[in-house]
Image (cartoon, grey):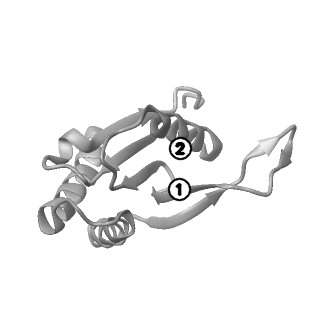
Amino acid sequence: MDRAYTDRIMKCLQEVHNELGPGLIASIYEEAVARELTENGFSVVRQVEVPVYYKREALGTPLTVSLILDGKVILDIQSVPMHSKLSERYMFTCLVCTNCELGFIVNFNVDNLRDGTYPVYNFRRPKK
């Protein structure tokens, strides 16, 4: 993943955090982030349902991804008291199911956004 590309994403996330601050619900941050990213040239899809397969058959309950950028990066927008390893596992599963390269868990309920941003890599994705 290109460093300049991820830096552009982080700049958009920081802009939303600077403007809104911590303490709101995740859906508000998600909408603001989607707007900011779109204004900065990213292709953004919100609330993407990702099928889960069991023995090659899709289950009736899909995973839901907050945002997918340009078909290759997932953003999981949160506003929670503290980070959870379960969120990382969920993100990794979403990355595998979508074949995306990289995901960021972004918790806006922090004073410094860097403290609330966690990258997750899809190490199962075939190398190009």
Marks 1 and 2 sit apart, C-alpha to C-alpha, by: 12 Å
Q: Amino acid at mark 2?
A: Cys
The C terminus: image quadrant: top right
- Residue 57 percent across, percent down from the top left: 87, 47
Dot 2 surroundings within 10 Å: few (below 14), some, or many (20 or more)? Answer: many
Q: Which residue is mark 1?
A: 65
Q: Mark on residue 100?
A: 2
- The answer to whether 47 is drawn above or below residue 72 in the figure is below
Q: Which mark is in front, 1 or 2?
A: 1
In this orientation, which residue lies closer to the viewer: 89 or 98? 89
Dot 1 surroundings within 10 Å: few (below 14), some, or many (20 or more)? Answer: many
Q: Amino acid at mark 1?
A: Val
Observer able to see residue 101 = no
- The answer to whether 123 is drawn above or below residue 21 in the figure is above
In primary-sequence order, the first of circles 1 and 2 is 1
Instruction: Write down the quadrant of residue 55 in the picture.
Output: top right
The N terminus: image quadrant: top left
- Residue 82 percent across, percent down from the top left: 31, 41
- State the residue at coordinates (23%, 59%): 12
- State the residue at coordinates (49%, 66%): 45
Is there CB contact under 8 Å for labels 1 and 2? no
- Residue 99 percent across, percent down from the top left: 60, 42
User: Which SS class for mark 1?
Assistant: strand
User: Which SS class for mark 2?
Assistant: loop
- State the residue at coordinates (43%, 43%): 103
- Residue 79 percent across, percent down from the top left: 33, 55
Q: Mark on residue 76?
A: none
- The answer to whether 95 is drawn above or below residue 109 in the figure is above
Instruction: Write down the quadrant of residue 93 in the picture.
Output: top right
